[in-house]
């Protein structure tokens, strides 16, 4: 099954997490360019987590249709880069991807939207019903920290 073509299991709920980060227009442009490059993810990972691309390339801009995997302890998220424009990018995860456990969290799609005032993230997952509130809190923590990392990018231009 390809990305996004898998059903929501009976014990799972759809979790759509969105977050907006507001930056100056210059900072937004700089951060957006960084978010479109492989090396931001291949060279910026905290071990033992890693991002790999099927092409073997670890630098340059993302290409639609490009396969990748983000992996480490409790994480196996393999997917395909979808649409890439000046204001939008998405990553469609494949069936079998998971965070923590395949029985708890299955990533479906990660989207970034650019506007003049900042960047918006939308992360869609299938989450086991009993784990849903915990996953929401974990998402809040992780993605807010990710936002602080984006702010730090602007310091080290």
Image: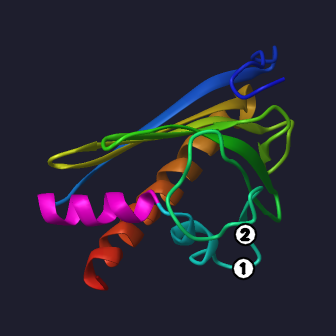
* In the displayed structure image, the side of residue 114 where residue 116 appears, left or right: left
Colour mapping: rainbow
Q: Residues within 10 Å of mark 2 (few under 14, many from 20)?
A: some
- Residue 96 x %, y %: 86, 37
Q: Which residue is mark 2?
A: 50
Numbered range of the magenta stretch: 24-36
Q: Is 69 located above or below residue 112 in the figure?
A: below
- Residue 123 x %, y %: 53, 39
State the SS at label 2. Answer: strand
Q: Residues within 10 Å of mark 1 (few under 14, many from 20)?
A: few
* In the displayed structure image, the side of residue 69 where residue 116 appears, left or right: left
Depth check, front residue: 53 or 139? 53
- For the C terminus, give its image quadrant: bottom left
Q: Using the image, tell me which numbered label, if any, was put on residue 110.
A: none
Write the residue at 76% across / 46% down.
78
Which quadrant of the figure has residue 82?
Answer: top right
* In the displayed structure image, the side of residue 122 where residue 125 appears, left or right: right
Q: Nearer the viewer, mark 2 or mark 1?
A: 2
State the SS at label 1. Answer: loop
- For the N terminus, give its image quadrant: top right
Q: Is 40 located above or below residue 133 in the figure?
A: below
The Cα atoms of the two marked residues, 2 and 1, are separated by 7 Å
Which quadrant of the figure has residue 14?
Answer: top right
Answer whether labels 2 and 1 touch (C-beta < 8 Å): yes
Q: Is residue 24 visible?
A: no
Write the residue at 57% across / 70% down.
59
Residue 30 within the magenta-colored segment of the rendering: yes
Write the residue at 57% across / 41% down.
64
Q: Which residue is mark 1?
A: 47
């Amino acid at each position: 099954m390809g990305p996004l073509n898998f059903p929501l299991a009976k014990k799972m709920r759809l979790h759509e997490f969105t977050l907006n980060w507001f930056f100056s227009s210059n900072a937004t442009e700089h951060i957006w360019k960084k978010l479109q490059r492989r090396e931001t993810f291949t060279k910026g990972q905290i071990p033992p987590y890693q991002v790999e691309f099927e092409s073997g390339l670890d630098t340059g801009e993302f290409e639609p249709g490009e396969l990748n995997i983000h992996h480490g302890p409790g994480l196996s998220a393999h997917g395909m880069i979808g649409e890439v424009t000046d204001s939008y990018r998405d990553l469609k995860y494949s069936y079998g991807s998971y965070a923590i456990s395949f029985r708890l969290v299955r990533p479906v799609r990660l989207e970034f939207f650019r506007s003049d005032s900042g960047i918006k993230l939308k992360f869609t997952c299938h989450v086991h019903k009993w784990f849903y509130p915990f996953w929401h809190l974990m998402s809040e923590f992780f993605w807010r920290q990710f936002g602080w990392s984006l702010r730090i990018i602007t310091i080290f231009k």
